């Protein structure tokens, strides 16, 4: 780790942090608070994915839908209108909408093969965005003169790495530049995340082996076929299993590559001084 002790952290003139864990536990909230405090550059992996690595996929998909309407097709073919995504730090809907959900096309579902193709596009995009972290640390300091840096990752980071492999290329690269911090939720947090997801299900990205396993299990359990699957029902059914699937991966990432803080402690952080103290305690108790 780039900080071996609380003293190392407190003495550092350039603090570099990476947050990981399930979405909804405070990664982006904490990042936004630190950015607003001054001195911290906020690098959002999800924003980088949506703008740099998947922006063209998203725009082309929207154009393909528009081309089905003769009026819009004529305007597009003559370059009379422009279609693009409006991805921002606070609006990542274009990315999740493009990922989509598998199942019945009359209910907005994608063919499973197409769904898997988009999952793979996202996997490659997220890995590329993560590997850009070092570049953005340099850019933030050189161009904007920010001394401190936050990498705010998506919940799916654990799907593409092997935390028990000391040579894992993604984790090796990230650990050279940042202190990796797991925001760990409690059972109560898990229940709340499931409740929220059930109310407003949104597409997620999964390890291909896990995805195929739950897809086949769903078809078997409900005795159904691809074109009859309710897309929202499938992703709701998958979500709780995904949390259980990801938990040991996060734990291994924290054990082998970083430190752990709890979502309860994160919720108590009010300013940069509180945050510095939180990380110092995590290093002391590691």
Image (cartoon, helix red, strand yellow):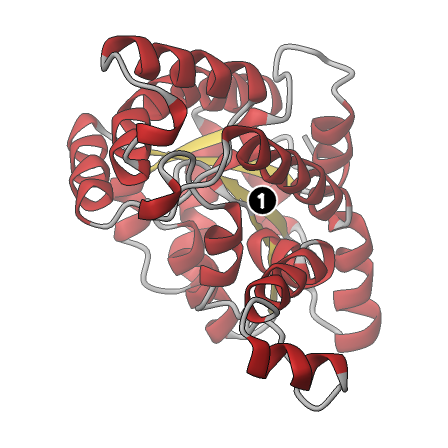
* Quadrant in the picture for residue 184: top left
As drawn, is 260 to the left or to the right of 236?
A: right
Look at 19% across and 26% down and name the residue there: 187
Q: Residue 124's x, y, as percent?
A: 71, 38
Look at 78% across and 16% down and name the residue there: 167
Look at 67% across and 42% down and name the residue there: 178
Q: Residue 86's x, y, as percent?
A: 55, 74
Mark 1 Cα shell of 10 Å, populated few (<14), some (14-19), many (≥20):
many
Q: In this view, does 252 lie above or below 96?
A: above
Look at 33% across and 15% down and name the residue there: 219
| Location of the N terminus (image quadrant) | top right
Label count reads 1
Q: Residue 227's x, y, as percent?
A: 38, 30
As drawn, is 91 to the left or to the right of 13?
A: left
Question: Would residue 150 be seen by someone viewing this image from the given angle?
Answer: no
Nearest the camera: 46 or 248? 46
Query: Which element type, helix, strand or loop, lies under badge 1?
Result: strand
Q: Mark 1 points at which residue?
A: 18
Nearest the camera: 261 or 32? 32
Hey, which residue is sitting farthest bottom in the picture?
Answer: 80
Q: Is residue 77 above or below residue 27?
A: below
As drawn, is 264 to the left or to the right of 255?
A: left
Q: Residue 46's x, y, as percent?
A: 56, 53
Question: Would residue 261 be seen by someone viewing this image from the given angle?
Answer: yes
Q: Is residue 242 above or below residue 268?
A: above
């Amino acid at each position: 780790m780039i900080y071996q002790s609380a003293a190392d952290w407190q003495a550092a003139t350039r603090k570099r942090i990476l947050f990981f864990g399930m979405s909804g536990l405070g990664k982006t909230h904490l990042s936004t608070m630190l950015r607003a405090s001054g001195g911290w550059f906020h690098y959002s992996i999800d924003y980088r994915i949506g703008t740099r690595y998947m922006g063209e996929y998203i725009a082309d998909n929207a154009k393909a839908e528009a081309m089905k309407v003769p009026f819009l097709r004529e305007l597009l073919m003559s370059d009379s209108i422009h279609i693009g995504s409006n991805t921002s730090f606070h609006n990542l809907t274009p990315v999740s909408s493009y990922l989509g959900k598998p199942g019945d096309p009359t209910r907005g579902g994608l063919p499973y093969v197409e769904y898997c193709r988009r999952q793979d596009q996202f996997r490659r995009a997220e890995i590329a965005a993560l590997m850009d972290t070092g570049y953005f640390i340099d850019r933030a300091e050189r161009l904007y003169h920010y001394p401190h840096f936050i990498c705010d990752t998506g919940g799916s980071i654990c799907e593409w790495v092997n935390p028990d492999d000391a040579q894992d290329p993604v984790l090796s690269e990230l650990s050279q530049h940042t202190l990796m911090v797991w925001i760990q939720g409690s059972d109560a947090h898990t229940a709340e995340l499931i409740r929220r997801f059930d109310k407003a299900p949104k597409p997620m990205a999964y390890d291909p082996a896990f995805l195929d396993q739950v897809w086949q299990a769903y078809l078997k359990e409900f005795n159904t076929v691809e074109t009859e699957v309710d897309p929202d029902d499938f992703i709701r059914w998958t979500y709780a299993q995904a949390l259980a699937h990801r938990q040991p991966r996060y734990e291994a990432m924290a054990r082998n590559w970083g430190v752990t803080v709890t979502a309860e402690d994160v919720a108590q952080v009010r300013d940069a001084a509180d945050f510095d103290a939180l990380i110092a305690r995590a290093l002391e108790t590691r």
